[in-house]
Image (cartoon, helix red, strand yellow):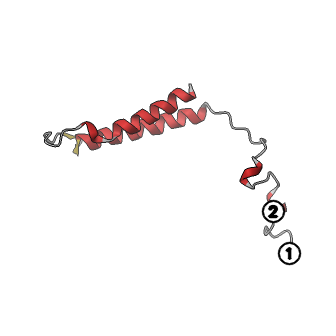
Amino acid sequence: MRMILLVAIGVLYVFSIPWYRAEDAPLRLVLGLPDWVAVALGCYAAVAVLNSIAWLLTDVRDDAELPASLGLTNAPKSEEPGSGADR
């Protein structure tokens, strides 16, 4: 399900670009905005909703080990260098 949401987000980003409009298309207003702006804003709002749903479906464990390639550790903040504990 999460992958489907991520693909839908990608499709919405592509659809938000007004490449499909003809240069000589008449100006139509939607809520006081040009129609292509209204479509783009609607796509961005839908992306935000789908992204939040995708994150709700993602299991993030707080006790998971961090990859060593990131150079981070799971050490408590008081043991980190420069945290004030070594002064």
Decide if residue 85 is on the left or right side of residue 38: right
Residue at the (81%, 62%) spot, across then down = 80
Q: What residue type is disc 1 on? A: Arg
Residue at the (77%, 50%) spot, across then down = 68
Q: CA distance from mark 1 to mark 2?
A: 12 Å
Kindly give the residue lying farthest to the right in the view shown. 86
Q: Label 1: which residue?
A: 87
Query: Residue 51's spot in the image, x, y percent?
Result: 51, 37
Residue at the (47%, 39%) spot, across then down = 48
Label 1: how many Cα within 10 Å (few below 14, some 14–19, many 20+): few
Decide if residue 11 is on the left or right side of residue 21: right
Residue at the (28%, 40%) spot, across then down = 19
Label 2: how many Cα within 10 Å (few below 14, some 14–19, many 20+): few
**In the figure, 75 relative to 38: above or below?**
below
Quarter of the rendering containing residue 40:
top left
Query: Residue 81's spot in the image, x, y percent?
Result: 81, 66
Circle 2 sits in a helix, a strand or a loop, which is it?
loop
Kindly give the residue lying farthest to the bottom in the view shown. 87
Q: Label 2: which residue?
A: 80
Label located before the other in sequence (1 or 2): 2
Q: What residue type is disc 2 on? A: Glu
The quarter of the image holding the N terminus is top right
